[in-house]
Image: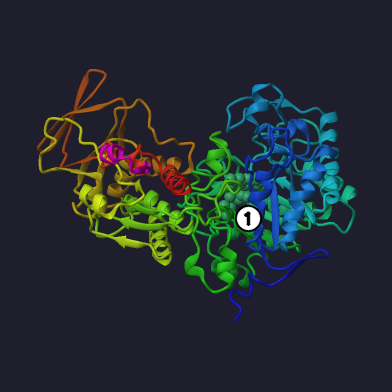
Amino acid sequence: MTFLPNLFSPIKIKTLELANRAVMPPMGTNLGNADATVSEANLAYLKRRARGGAGMIITEISSVHPNGSAINSELGAYDDRFIPGLKKLADVAHAAGSKTALQLHHAGRESFYLLKQGKAIAPSPIRSLVFGLTPREITREEIQEIIAAFGAAAFRAREAGFDAVEVHGAHGYLLTQFLSALSNQRQDEYGGSLSNRSRFIVEVLQEVRRRVGSDFPISLRLSVEECIKGGYTIEEIQSILPNLVKAGADVIHASLGTHGSPGGITSAPAEYEPGFNVWRAKKVKEVVGVPVIAVGRFSDPALADAVIGRGEADLVAFGRQFLADPDFLLKAREGRPEEIRKCLACNQGCIERLILGEGNIRCAINPETGQEIIYPKGPAAKPRKVWVVGAGPGGLTAAYEGARLGHNVTLYEKEEIPGGQLRFACKPPCKSNYGEWSDWLISQVKKMGITVHTSTTVTERMIEDGNPDALILAVGGEIIRPAIAGIDLPMVCDAWQILSGEVAPRKNAVVIGGGLIGMETADFLCEKGAQVTIVETLKRSPVLKITSHGYMLHKRLKDRNCQLHFNTEVKIIAEGSVIIVSEGREQVLSPVDQVVIAAGLKPRDDFQQFLQARGISHFVIGDARQPRRIIESTEEGARAAWDL
Ligand SMILES: Cc1cc2nc3c(=O)[nH]c(=O)nc-3n(C[C@H](O)[C@H](O)[C@H](O)COP(=O)(O)O)c2cc1C
């Protein structure tokens, strides 16, 4: 039986035949060598994904010019010395049966390190929306130099064995900067009218075509709508697309937005429905005859199959899904869709980690991603008897990884239902996928044959009797109850009681704590119709608006008229009111019929002294070590299992 016949049908781009219509779109990894050459880590990362069987893999941004890298270790395509490394990348894709395109990139003003050195160039000296610094205006001679550099880099891609190239005209980089009237205020023939602003892209395509020859496919990745106030529209792009095809584009990869668009829409958060951007691909198809790639929050191959079946797009790109589960296409193809680990669109390990300069690519729910080189294959040289205490995301990951490596793992959970914090994290708006991930983790742990004891509180006696070789303590954090007058009144509860449904929301609520849990609980309460005030002692919100989820959360709370008081403490809770203090000034909040504590968690040290005294090997992970995000829990859980 053939599953998903539309997705898994071949397609031709010019003379290039792709085995199926699934595309792995370009994703910067930050794994390259410091000299911009391809590293072993790049190859291992790509090899792992190529096994997944995409028809086409478009490799990550590769700079066509030394002054065009977004980060200084971005892969280079601006010199012949890069060809041997690029060839290895192409070989990795080919060995797995995929076709591959090299993405050609110039960052323009969106390069923090070049901006800081005063070397970033752009059509006009207009401040980067991402980094807040101003680039230098590119000269007409430099325009010709960069156009030639795109052509030369495309030629190198062909030399290196790539089957195609992709010109990066999306996401606010140099080509988009020319296209957008917000960043292009030139007075010459490259500025002004839309036709003039698109001239740079046209000339880049023409030069690439001249250098690669008539038979070599060129994909144009375009943000087909800028998704920013005053930015260009999809209708404007429709009017120039035929000309871009004429200039050389054989495929249009219909992305959207820039890194400066509010809410991180280029790698959209879970607020956006899977496939939310398909309508734009459809609009592109209305005006061009070449194949069109749809992209945006695809994690379900069945949805991609339906989109292709309805003729809304010819191919579908799965970006972050390839980070969450590189085998998802195989699972779909073999009729095992329930085994797919679906991307949460949380962006913690991928795009935001890169943009915030936190390190190389990772995935919050797949500890292998970005660590392929060190990821142990198993089996462990010495299988050990391991107890994992706590079945939250860290504990479940630790148990799974331990069993995968051949250890004899038993998992203990004091609650009736495993999942830990995920049982609550999935309740606020737009977070139900956390519940699905929790169910997936539990199913995988069971499938691994791990014995799971729920409703079981581990004791020192049990450890003595059971005599495990090692324990992984994933016992979670302890709820902080601030010492405030009135905290024991019946109107006071905590965020977990609200999210679990144990305590029903009331009309006028004060949430103590404006961290992620506080804000998400407020979001939950607002959705239920409550009027909510958040009180937070920190001067600024710890939930950053530059993260996509943070932006969405702040926006939703603002739209729902939630009041936020920073640099403020709750002094007294009384029946019907709360007194808050900010910089010595008191204010009475009234009416208040519910106070919700969300002041965070603190680490727990259960069993640690006992285990240390007896010399029993143990690891403390996740919130038990220090309450943080999901990515830290899963990372520590996996590492503990690898280090057993
Ligand atoms: C870690 C990361 C790096 C990315 N790097 C690139 C890139 O190099 N070039 C590009 O055109 N898009 C890049 N993108 C955008 C993706 O190709 C894709 O368009 C986006 O993530 C939306 O698709 P998805 O919802 O399937 O993830 C990147 C996205 C992520 C998550």
Residue 354 position, x and y percent, is 57, 38
Which quadrant is home to the N terminus?
Answer: bottom right
Q: Is residue 616 magenta?
A: yes
Q: Does 121 appear above or below 557?
A: above
Q: Amino acid at mark 1?
A: Arg
Tag 1 secondary structure: helix
Boundaries of the magenta span: 609-622
Can you name the residue that lies furthest to the bottom here? 1
Q: Residue 104: which quarter of the image?
A: top right
State the residue in front, 222 or 381.
381
**Pointer 1: residues within 10 angstroms few (<14), some, or many (20+)?**
many
Q: Is residue 194 magenta?
A: no
Q: Is residue 226 visible?
A: no
| Left or right: residue 306 compared with residue 519 | right
Disc 1 target residue: 48
336 or 407, nearer to the observer: 407
Q: Is residue 594 left or right of residue 265?
A: left
Residue at 20% x, 47% y: name it. 507
Tell me where residue 321 appears, x and y as whole percent. 55, 56
Instruction: Note whether 181 is above or below 346 in the view shown.
Output: above
Residue at image coords 53%, 60%:
299
Render colour scheme: rainbow
Residue 281: image x %, image y %?
Answer: 64, 59
Residue beneath the point at 80% across and 42% down: 199
